[in-house]
């Protein structure tokens, strides 16, 4: 039998440093999670706000007033505005998560509250991002309908 197969495996001399590194990375991720979600919400608010303003400006100065007879056509032009407003609303709600009582002397309670806040913010952010993507698609459809005449 081969002696190398029976000899114990030597421990990695860098394992403590690697574990410490990943522990710090985990701490940084947890500390920065709410800030990252807030920053993403700010970006969505900025993009949706600009698109909303441009869309309203384009509609206001177009020759569409009084020409939309069919409900479907009206809905096509209204959908981008509604989706953008919904996206703005959901992104704004990221800054107002549910209120949870917190006893800072109980680490487990703080962990539970943090997870709930992050989960709530993340769900709202996903909703805002999804409605923004749908709004961009609706803008494209409205543009194609307008150009088709």
Image: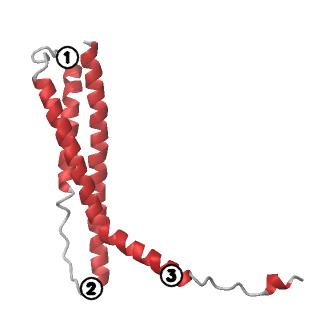
**59 with respect to 22 (left or right):** left
Q: Residues within 10 Å of mark 3 (few under 14, many from 20)?
A: few
Q: Looking at the image, is 42 positioned above or below residue 75?
A: below
Q: Residues within 10 Å of mark 1 (few under 14, many from 20)?
A: few
- Quick one: 148 or 110, which is closer to the camera? 148
Q: Looking at the image, is 23 positioned above or below residue 90?
A: below
Find the distance from the CA under tag 1 to the CA under tag 2.
61 Å
- Quick one: 82 or 71, which is closer to the camera? 82
Q: Secondary structure at mark 1?
A: loop
Q: Secondary structure at mark 2?
A: loop
Residue 102 on image: x %, y %: 20, 78
- Quick one: 98 or 33, which is closer to the camera? 33
**55 with respect to 26 (left or right):** left
Res. 98 image quadrant: bottom left
In the image, what residue occupies the spot 10% across and 24% down? 60
Q: Residues within 10 Å of mark 2 (few under 14, many from 20)?
A: few
The mark closer to the camera, 1 or 3, is: 3
The residue pinned by badge 2 equals 106
The residue pinned by badge 1 equals 70
In the image, what residue occupies the spot 68% across and 85% down? 10
> Cβ–Cβ below 8 Å for labels 1 and 3?
no
Residue 18 on image: x %, y %: 51, 78
Q: Looking at the image, is 134 positioned above or below residue 141?
A: below
Residue 75 on image: x %, y %: 21, 26
Find the distance from the CA under tag 1 to the CA under tag 3.
68 Å
The residue pinned by badge 3 equals 17
Q: Quadrant of the N terminus?
A: bottom right
In the image, what residue occupies the spot 64% across and 85% down? 11
């Amino acid at each position: 039998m081969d002696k190398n197969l029976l000899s114990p495996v030597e421990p990695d001399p860098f394992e403590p440093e690697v574990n410490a590194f990943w522990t710090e990375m985990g701490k940084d991720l947890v500390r920065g999670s709410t800030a990252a979600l807030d920053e993403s919400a700010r970006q969505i608010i900025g993009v949706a706000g600009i698109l909303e303003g441009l869309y309203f400006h384009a509609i206001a100065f177009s020759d569409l007033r009084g020409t939309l007879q069919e409900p479907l056509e009206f809905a096509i032009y209204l959908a981008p505005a509604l989706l953008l407003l919904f996206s703005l609303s959901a992104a704004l709600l990221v800054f107002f998560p549910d209120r949870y009582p917190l006893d800072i002397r109980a680490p487990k309670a703080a962990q539970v509250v943090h997870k709930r806040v992050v989960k709530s913010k993340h769900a709202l952010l996903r909703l805002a991002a999804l409605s923004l993507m749908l709004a961009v698609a609706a803008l494209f459809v409205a543009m194609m309908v307008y150009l088709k005449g």
